[in-house]
Amino acid sequence: MSNRLTDFEEEVYLFIKERGEVLTSNLPPRMMGVVPKLKNMGLVKVYKKLTTPWASKKRKYVRVTEDRPKE
């Protein structure tokens, strides 16, 4: 698998990196489709956590795992 990102994948990666931690539901619909590929490449992490202390439902978040290696 190539570590090269397309322009749009790079845009999504930077979008997530700038914001730090993003609810997956807050990502624009087109950007949600790129998240699985970024996850498989090890560039982002998708995880669940509570949004408020009194809520029992967890929500999915995405964040950048670490800086991307230079090509």
Image: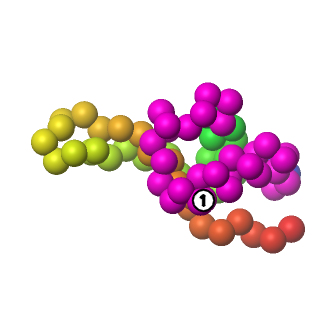
Which image quarter: residue 43? bottom right
Density class for disc 1 (Cα within 10 Å; few <14, some 14-19, many ≥20) is: some
Indicate the position of residue 59 as horizontal and vertical percent values: 35, 38
Q: Residue visible at 47% across and 54% down?
A: 21
Q: Is residue 36 above or below residue 14?
A: above
- Which amino acid type is shown beneath numbered disc 1? Lys
Q: Residue visible at 81% across and 55% down?
A: 3
Indicate the position of residue 54 as horizontal and vertical percent values: 13, 42
Indicate the position of residue 50 as horizontal and vertical percent values: 27, 45
Q: Is residue 57 above or below residue 64?
A: above
Side (left or right) of 54 relative to 15: left
Side (left or right) of 9 relative to 67: right
Q: Is residue 25 magenta?
A: yes
Q: Residue visible at 62% across and 47% down?
A: 39
Question: Which of these two is toward me, 68 or 41?
Answer: 68
Main SS category, magenta section: helix
Element type where label 1 sits in the image: helix
Q: Is residue 9 magenta?
A: yes
Side (left or right) of 40 relative to 49: right
Highlighted range, magenta: 3-31
- Mark 1 sits on what residue? 17
Q: Quadrant of the C terminus?
A: bottom right
Side (left or right) of 4 relative to 34: right
Indicate the position of residue 40 as horizontal and vertical percent values: 66, 46
Q: Is residue 27 visible?
A: yes
Q: Is residue 40 visible?
A: no
Q: Which residue is outermost to the top?
A: 29
